Image: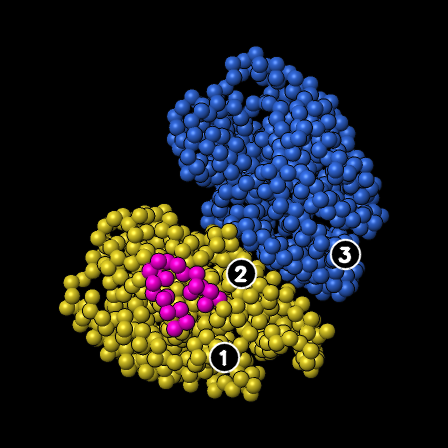
Chain colours: A yellow, B blue
Amino acid sequence: MSYQRLEKAFYRLAQLDHAIAMLGWDQQVMMPPKGNAARGRALAELQVMSTEIMQAPSLLEAMALAESESGGLEDWQQANLREMVSDIKAANAVPKELVEALAIASNDCEHAWRSLRQDNNWRDFEPLLQKVVDLTVEKAQALNAALRDEKGFANDYEALLDVYDPGTRMKRIDPVFTQLKTELPVLLQEVMERQNAESPPTGQTSPVEKHRQVALAHNIMGILGIDFDASRLDEAAHPFSGGVSDDSRITSRYDELDVFGGIMAVIHECGHSRYETGLNRDWRYRPVGSSMGMGVHESQSLFFEMQLGRSRPFIEAIAPLFSKHLADVPAFSANNMYRLCTRVEPGLIRVNADEVTYPLHVILRYELERDLVLGKAEVKDIPERWDVAMHEHLGLDTTGNYRDGPMQDIHWPSGSIGYFPSYTLGAMNAAQLYHAMQRAIPDAPELVGRLELQPIFEWLSANVWQKGRLHSYDDLMTGATGETLNPRYFLDHLRSRYRRSD
Amino acid sequence: MSYQRLEKAFYRLAQLDHAIAMLGWDQQVMMPPKGNAARGRALAELQVMSTEIMQAPSLLEAMALAESESGGLEDWQQANLREMVSDIKAANAVPKELVEALAIASNDCEHAWRSLRQDNNWRDFEPLLQKVVDLTVEKAQALNAALRDEKGFANDYEALLDVYDPGTRMKRIDPVFTQLKTELPVLLQEVMERQNAESPPTGQTSPVEKHRQVALAHNIMGILGIDFDASRLDEAAHPFSGGVSDDSRITSRYDELDVFGGIMAVIHECGHSRYETGLNRDWRYRPVGSSMGMGVHESQSLFFEMQLGRSRPFIEAIAPLFSKHLADVPAFSANNMYRLCTRVEPGLIRVNADEVTYPLHVILRYELERDLVLGKAEVKDIPERWDVAMHEHLGLDTTGNYRDGPMQDIHWPSGSIGYFPSYTLGAMNAAQLYHAMQRAIPDAPELVGRLELQPIFEWLSANVWQKGRLHSYDDLMTGATGETLNPRYFLDHLRSRYRRSD
């Protein structure tokens, strides 16, 4: 059976992905610095091997046959076939040599970025990034040329968007981002005025040792349903969640003077982790049993962090844990913590941004990377364009501050261009899903207040995690919430949370 | 060029080996327990992929051509070709399905062993081990059938010996082991009498926190030339050294009441690590640039641990570090530490054994595994044969104590049958190499006393590390020491160190 032939190839790809995921985690979390060159070679070779599997003429023949024989397949197998075909076509659009060149260039650039960013050294970073951008543009052109007819891409950039968030096009993003660009500055102004009229919340003043923060993090992870026999928590410069379904690797960072930053990162990564570990086990090692694009993935992390994690009942419920693990000080009183966790303040750093200003960071990056790919901007123009946009959106100056400007993110140096919009799509998905969950579980706020979160996780499991890639993104959202993406829920959420008076 | 075609295949194999090495390290050191099934699948698939590369008809054709075209190659390339051909032939002797079945069975058995050993549960362990032994015997038969004519194996067990220590045959081992079985009990008797006539050394009485032991270990690793930008030290139940040449992963275990055990394990693993990281960089990713068999590998760890690490000048030189990092107590005085580190005492556990009794543990295992493979013993007979041999060699009883008897080692459950003799061959190689090094560097004891070890490492580098697999084992030993393996040096070393009076 040709379908089984495809499944066998994807089983092998899943095992290569296991290796790539774990080697990637190790590279960020464990690897000594001199190991990087050898690691880059190994990762590049594994990626080339994946590409060779995808580009094998026998697989393409099996794919054609499987499509013609698909009558006897069950629904989930039909969906699996659809996803396999889509993955194979995408993998065949980019030449193997380009895959390898991009893997090596982005490995080199990302590695150099770690120290160059520390040194605020744009000059030496620019040529490395230029190479990554050039190769990524080549990849975008190849994807667009091969898949345009079938997928309806309007341009090369849309082909990259589709890599991270299948189905997303600029015509979905542009009107929504325009609306955010219009409404958020107004809301921001209102919030700043309210905040300025109030006495500020009490900040954390005394340092908290790392091991206490880790103990608190473990406690909260347990509340969020993390199984420590199938997960680890480690430290990384840039928090992320990696690993595989039975072996989830969560990372965070710990600043002795900013406990909230590290803990909120943990809560965020728990959302990613529960999604991956909550996928349908019967469909394991198959595309249909994998997570959806990054816009849905990010909806889970932001459901955990923003919708649940920074809600007043959740903060009130976990405040006693802060006092228990850290210190019984005014900064960790429930009301003060809620005010701290929902404080709005325009800043230079995306990952530290609050919910209100975050989309403006994303829009800046979206417009810039889009123009880079479409030939309307050049790598050397990035610092100036960054500065102009930061002035315009947030009234902040980044002249000469590359470290906290265009060198702050890992995405571009590691070759992830087309990824940023997923964050804000994720935020909107999360708000819409949380709203639907509250309709389905009317006593959700009370449950959250008692940290009885199991019904909420079950709702997520049934509506998102267990679905894998069975449905399209639009169908997934319609099944879960009754409608496709609607930015209203996100804007309502922001207004309701941030227009309050404390 | 067919030679380049082979090199390209071995480059890919080296990248797969990178992944396998790192995933294996992670499995022992980092992986949460529920990750094991998925990890086993991934490792098995990577091994199958390696086998497929080795068994590709086009590679076999290229091999035949390369052998006929080898005239223009440089010496090191000739050696590389010889090693590639040997590896390819061995890989083609075992069917891919058997490689995969053995990978899965040994992964399962090793994983179960970790808890079954804790529980002293031989009954549930036996069928898992039976499966591993059955498949290993099948592998031995396949190797022997395919390679007998060329390699001159006398039987199936020799084919397994050759996997771990190429070139080693029973006719090398048997007379040496017979000599050890005769001489060591006599020496043991003498040593025990001497020790009993003396007041015992002062044992460690108060616990030492792990972080202090780790700090001491790092200090000693630095003295042994470990580069921490290319290495890590972590904790594992069973100390080992893994990783790749630029990224060495050393592990140890820490017992608060036995600092010496953990530190000596670190020194041992440093020998393995320096060998791997000291290989010729110009030959990287090629068999000629890889380490030799386990008998040579173990010679490096035992050179570090036994010849250097437990020598009186080294112990005297590092004793102040124990006082500095741990506590200034009588147990850590130089003379007392030397007496502790060279104390002989028959015990149940191989890895805790002293130099005098260690070979008896190895001989027990050698005779047993040899008989298992040759059909002269069965898995169910292991506990009884173990008990008989422990009585005979060391006068100790292990009846019903599986945990500290036949279940103590990771080797058999993980499918490493034919490996044990390497430990004692390594001990003999180490003594012979140390003796030759001292001839070449007459002031070696004074250098050791000042911890100026660089000249010793340079001697090892020139004579062992940089050679890789350029020469055969016999030629390597002759080049370094002027003769092939001679057990005299090991026995002289034991007599000189253990017949002393303190």
- Judge whether residue B28 is colored magenta: no
The residue nearer to you, when weighing B369 against A492, is A492
Residue tagged by mark 3?
Answer: B95
* Count of marks, rendered view: 3
Residue A490 pos. (x, y %): 34, 75
Q: Closest to the observer: A502 or A52?
A: A502
Crowd tier of the residue under label 1, counting other residues whose Cα lies within 10 Å: few below 14, some 14–19, many 20 or above: some
Q: Residue at x 40, y 23 (%)?
A: B329
Residue name at image x 80 percent, y 50 percent: B142
User: Residue at left 71%, top 22%?
Assistant: B183
Q: Earlier in the sequence, mark 2 or mark 1?
A: 2
Vertical comparison of A420 with A242: above or below: below
Residue A446 in magenta stretch: yes
Pair 3/2: label in front: 2
What residue is rendered at 62% in x and 36% in y? Answer: B120
- Horizontal side of B421 relative to A36 (left or right) equals right
Q: Separation of disc 1 and disc 3 at Cα?
A: 47 Å
Q: Classify 10 Å Cα crowding around label 2: few (below 14), some (14-19), many (20 and above).
A: many
> Which kind of residue does numbered mark 3 sit on?
Pro
Q: Which chain letter goes with mark 2?
A: A
For the N terminus of chain B, the quadrant is bottom right
Element class at badge 2? loop
Tell me, yes or no, whether the two marked residues, 1 and 3, touch with CB atoms within 8 Å. Answer: no
Label 3 CA crowd tier, 10 Å (few <14, some 14–19, many 20+): some
| Dot 2 amino acid type | Ser
**Which amino acid lies under the numbered mark 1 shown in the image of this protein?**
Asp
Q: For the residues tagged 2 and 1, is the chain the same?
A: yes
**Any mark on residue A475, and which?**
1
The magenta stretch is A439-461
Q: Which residue is mark 2?
A: A245
| Residue B177 x/y as whole percent | 73, 29
